[in-house]
Amino acid sequence: MKYFTIEELTRSATAERLGIVNTPDVKIIENLTLLTDKLLDPLRELWGGPLRVTSGYRCPALNRAVGGVVNSHHLRGMAADLVTTANTAASHRQLMQRLRESGLRWTQAIMERNRRGATWLHVSYDPASLRGEVLSRMA
């Protein structure tokens, strides 16, 4: 773990606001470490600058509170939502393109956008299913 920490991969303003304890167990920490070593750190190096995690691990209560899907990789510490420092749709599409051209392996890469127009790149790493799926969806 070169550029990211367990603390930033588990931090949640929503959890703090709602009093949800979002503390990972040992297996979740192992998954977060693998996600970081195999995908997040290499992607950050390809990008050549900082990336910010807006959502990493989510305990079940936090996942429900944010409207996450019931089988989310976030629940297992296998996913992170990322934004660039520019935090624009164009920069997030460029980050997705760099990932696609990188040769890195991943489970899912999803360009997401909410109703307010904010975008981010969701990436997941499940070593049992490195299918390289690329999607785009309205969150």
Image (cartoon, rainbow, N blue to C red):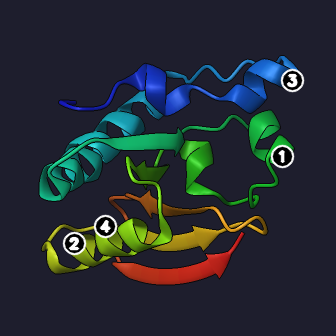
Mark 3 → mark 1, Cα distance in angstroms: 12 Å
Q: Are marks 1 and 4 in contact (CB under 8 Å)?
A: no
Q: Are marks 4 and 3 in contact (CB under 8 Å)?
A: no
Q: As shown in the figure, which amino acid type bears the numbered disc 1?
A: Arg
- Up/down of 83 relative to 6, above or below: below
Between marks 3 and 1 in the image, the one whose residue lies nearer the viewer = 3
Q: Is residue 130 visible?
A: no
Question: Which numbered circle lies on residue 18?
Answer: 3
Q: In this rendering, would 87 be left or right of 116? A: left
Q: In this rendering, would 99 be left or right of 133? A: left
Residue 61 image position (x, y, % from top left): 82, 35
Residue 15 image position (x, y, % from top left): 75, 26
> Which residue was labeled with disc 2?
98
Q: Secondary structure at mark 1?
A: helix
Q: How many labels were placed on the picture?
A: 4
Q: In this rendering, would 82 be left or right of 47? A: right
Q: Secondary structure at mark 4?
A: helix
Q: As shown in the figure, which amino acid type bears the numbered disc 2?
A: Arg
Q: Earlier in the sequence, mark 2 or mark 1?
A: 1
> Which residue was labeled with disc 4?
95
Residue 64 image position (x, y, % from top left): 83, 46
- Dot 3 surroundings within 10 Å: few (below 14), some, or many (20 or more)? few
- Up/down of 85 relative to 107, above or below: above
